[in-house]
Image: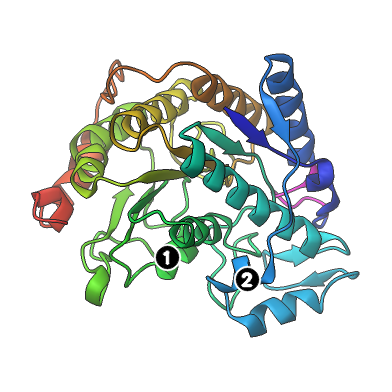
Amino acid sequence: MVLYFTPRVLDHVTPAGHPESPERGDVMRAAVLRAGDLGIAVRAPRAATDDDICRVHEAAYLAELEARRGRASALDADTFTSPDSIEVARLAAGAAVDAVLHAWRTGEPALAIVRPPGHHAERAQAMGFCLLSNVAIAAAAARAAGAARVALVDIDVHHGNGTQWAFYTDPSVLVVNTHQFPFYPGTGAASEAGHGPGAGFTLNVPLEAGATDADHAHVWNTIVDPALVRFAPDLLIVSAGFDAHQDDPLGSQRVTTAGFRAWLSALRARASLTCGGRIAVVTEGGYDLQALRSCLDATVDVLHAPAPADAVWRDAAGPDRRGREAAQALQGHPLVAGHGA
């Protein structure tokens, strides 16, 4: 595997007490140092170009962000810039692009450990701690590089609205979200399934607060993995938010570190079986620092090890009512019913 990271993540500074703090960057740097000790190649990313960014965002929005260079500002009640934030956001998006293009061209797993996160940023709006839509920018770059069918799987506790809307009418990109619902940002109902040519290529799996490893295992085995098999992507991109962790202060799900390891193992296996091993993982949320570190280490371990032989999520014991209810709500979805592309 290859890992993309820059210590510039520490230069995006948020107000005191903000969950998306530079301390997250310290945790990320420690996880990257461990990866280097394992012999994993760590590469500095390039900054995303205007062309990269404007495949997803409006040029006027990018210009608005650029006008904030060198100063602190508030974009909304949750989302802030510091003097270096715009450059750091470009590096985060560039790391996502670099990781995705590496996976696409080589068939090797790639990981981008970045902040600020990206999946809430919409075409012309920053929100939810996010300035640029990192994974959407990277997926658009992969399409431009020749990937015909790209699948995005977002396992953050919050729905990735920015990623969803970027491809809502696009049948070449499948966007899958598993998330707490109802919850911030208010989107992500099962009925949001794409529009026009993209109808059926958005798959939202809303989970009630309190969802456990067993609930997530159920929706993976019965909904998400079968949909990926039916879509048959050339490339799999993962928005790896760790705020569904049981210790996270922002979410109300109960996924363990072992559960996140199982998530990544299942996704890695599916990429090996379906995409020629082409998988890129990009970090999103995760606000308990100890949980973030353990989940980053688990992600590195999964991508560094040989791919599992199959994509079945096993050994998630316990009640799975929330997962079964989420799966039941999706029985009419084209990819769940087996009638998608």
Q: Which residue is mark 2?
A: 51
Amino acid identity at mark 2: Asp
Q: Residues within 10 Å of mark 2 (few under 14, many from 20)?
A: few
Position of residue 254 measured from the top left corner of the image (x, y, whole percent): 43, 32
Residue situated in front as seen by the camera: 244 or 234: 234
Q: Say whether residue 185 is visible.
A: no
Q: Amino acid at mark 1?
A: Gly
Q: Residue at x 64, y 33 (%)?
A: 3
Q: Position of residue 288 (x, y in %)?
A: 64, 35
Q: CA distance from mark 2 to mark 1?
A: 30 Å
Q: Which of the two discs, 2 and 1, sits closer to the camera?
A: 2
207 left or right of 15?
left
Q: Nearer the viewer, residue 246 or 173?
A: 173
Q: Estimate the x, y position of residue 118 in percent, counting from the top left.
A: 59, 57
Decide: is 221 above or below 15.
above
Local packing at callout 1 (Cα closer than 10 Å; few below 14, some 14-19, many 20+) is few
As drawn, is 147 to the left or to the right of 171?
right
Can you say whether 140 is above or below 235 in the image? below
The residue at 46%/28% (across/down) is 260
Q: Where's the C terminus, which quadrant?
A: bottom left
Q: Which residue is mark 1?
A: 186
Examine the rendering and report whether any part of residue 30 can be seen: yes
